[in-house]
Amino acid sequence: MIDRITENEKRLDNALESVKKLEESLELFKSNQKDIRKLNRYYGSKTWFKDKEAYEKKEINQIKAGVLSKDAVWNLDESIGKLITEMRRIVDSYK
């Protein structure tokens, strides 16, 4: 009986910790939604192409510019999509 209680106490502790971390992560993600939307509007826009061209021609100082790559923002969106799919699957498993 003591082993059963101890095992379930560990499960409870682990579940509480994972819920706490998920809450923190969701809050951080929610706080970045506005910036993510702005980033998506910028990516592939006329301004983005102009900035990319200027960067490639070294008309601007070489700075960190992963946002000008073809894959960075697209990969971010793919990752978000996969997380949304996984969250839906998890939610559906609680029904």
Image (cartoon, grey):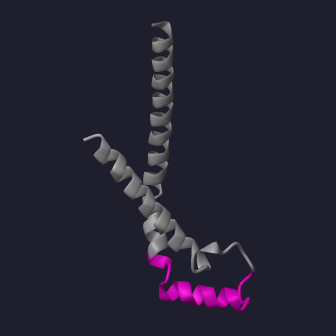
| Residue 64 x, y percent position in the rendering | 70, 72
Q: Is residue 55 part of the magenta span, yes or no? A: yes
Q: Magenta stretch?
A: 41-61
Residue 83, image quadrant: bottom left
Relative to 72, is 56 on the left or the right? right
Instruction: Kindly identify the residue that appears in the image at 69 percent across and 88 percent down.
Output: 56
Instruction: Kindly identify the residue that appears in the image at 68 percent across and 86 percent down.
Output: 55
Q: Is residue 71 part of the magenta span, yes or no? A: no
Instruction: Kindly identify the residue that appears in the image at 45 percent across and 7 percent down.
Output: 1
Q: Nearer the viewer, residue 15 or 70?
A: 15
| Residue 77 x, y percent position in the rendering | 47, 68
Residue 51, image quadrant: bottom right
| Residue 22 x, y percent position in the rendering | 46, 41
| Residue 19 x, y percent position in the rendering | 45, 35
- What is the residue that sits farthest to the left in this orientation? 95
* Quadrant in the picture for the C terminus: top left
Magenta: main secondary structure equals helix
